[in-house]
Amino acid sequence: MNSKVYLDKSNALDEMRDSPGESESDDDDDDDDGLDFGKDDEEGQQTMELEKMRMDFQRDLELQKKQILERAQAEIAKIREGDDED
């Protein structure tokens, strides 16, 4: 097959996107023996763990943000009290 025919129709990321000889469809899973049931479950478990980690991280960030704002407000209040005394 002459790949140069398709180069003028390509983008920089996918030179052979129009080439029928190079296409990979979902129907062409030759290496699929039906033994990958655990693979999907494992990926789902990893996805759930990552989502939990993301949510925990987000919660920690929000807590830190709240603490920083409270400290800043307390410092501002102290500064204003000092200005009022002068």
Image (tube, rainbow, N blue to C red):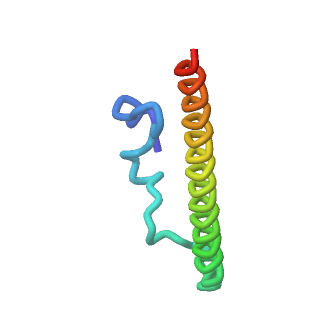
Using the image as rendered, state which of residue 73 and residue 58 is in the foreground: 73
Residue 18 in the image: state x and y as whole percent: 36, 46
Residue at image x 47%, y 52%?
Answer: 22
Using the image as rendered, state which of residue 44 and residue 13 is in the foreground: 44
Residue at image x 61%, y 46%?
Answer: 67
Vertical relation: 4 (above or below) 42: above
Residue 29 in the image: state x and y as whole percent: 53, 71
The quadrant where residue 57 appears:
bottom right
Using the image as rendered, state which of residue 11 and residue 70 is in the foreground: 70
**Quadrant into which the C terminus falls:** top right
Q: Residue furthest top?
A: 86
Vertical relation: 29 (above or below) 75: below
The quadrant where residue 53 appears:
bottom right
Residue 73 in the image: state x and y as whole percent: 55, 36
Residue at image x 39%, y 37%?
Answer: 6
Q: Residue furthest front?
A: 85
Vertical relation: 60 (above or below) 15: below
Using the image as rendered, state which of residue 69 and residue 45 is in the foreground: 69
Residue 16 in the image: state x and y as whole percent: 44, 42
Q: How many marks?
A: 0
The quadrant where residue 34 appears:
bottom right
Residue at image x 40%, y 33%?
Answer: 11
Vertical relation: 8 (above or below) 54: above
